[in-house]
Image (tube, grey):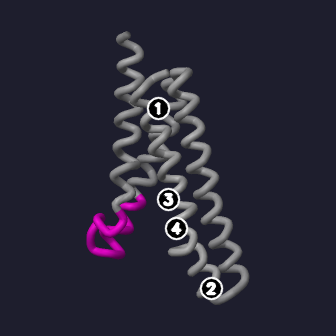
Amino acid sequence: MNIPITICAVLMALITGVHVVGGGPEYHAVYQETLATPHLTSMAGVLWHAITVNLVVMALALFWLARIPSWPLAIALAAMQLGWSGLFIYYGLTQLGSPWPMPQWIAFILIPLLTFYGLRQHRTA
């Protein structure tokens, strides 16, 4: 088992747990209570749970990658995570004036870097 990629998988699983446990009451429940129409609350629910599904799939894919190296899978996961980083940075800067109120972008940059390090380490072993 590739240790750096296993660390990435565990981090992604922890991020998923924080999203579900911490983010649910702080964000999802608030969206459900404050959005103006059933259509908006339904869409917010779908988007919230789609993020959860995406995080779970990324964690499972990283656990898979830790056992069975695959550059195409790593690149696909990195593209998703770097896309998320870009969104956190963009909205942090444009809506909040700084990327620091939403520091999730850091994890979504570090995990692909550590994943690629793990794959390179495996290739040279």
Residue drawn at the location 55% of the way across and 43% of the way down? 58
Q: Earlier in the sequence, mark 1 or mark 3?
A: 1
Point out the stretch of residues depicted in magenta: 87-102
Q: Are marks 4 and 3 in contact (CB under 8 Å)?
A: yes
Dot 2, how many residues are within 10 Å of its Cα: few (below 14), some (14-19), or many (20+)?
few
**Label number found at residue 23:** 4
The stretch drawn in magenta includes residue 101: yes
Residue 20 sits above or below residue 8 on the image: below
- Amino acid type, residue under disc 2 in the picture: Glu
Residue drawn at the location 54% of the way across and 31% of the way down? 73
Q: CA distance from mark 1 to mark 3?
A: 18 Å
Q: State the residue position of label 3.
A: 18
Q: Name the foreground residue: 57 vs 72.
A: 57
Q: State the residue position of label 2.
A: 33
SS under mark 3: helix
Q: Earlier in the sequence, mark 2 or mark 4?
A: 4
Q: CA distance from mark 1 to mark 2?
A: 38 Å
Dot 3, how many residues are within 10 Å of its Cα: few (below 14), some (14-19), or many (20+)?
few
Q: CA distance from mark 2 to mark 3?
A: 21 Å
Question: Which part of the image, by quadrant, shows the C terminus?
Answer: top left
The stretch drawn in magenta includes residue 83: no
Mark whose residue sits in front, 2 or 3: 3
- Amino acid type, residue under disc 1 in the picture: Thr
Q: Earlier in the sequence, mark 1 or mark 4?
A: 1
Dot 4, how many residues are within 10 Å of its Cα: few (below 14), some (14-19), or many (20+)?
some
Left or right of 35 in this view: 10:
left
Q: Earlier in the sequence, mark 2 or mark 3?
A: 3
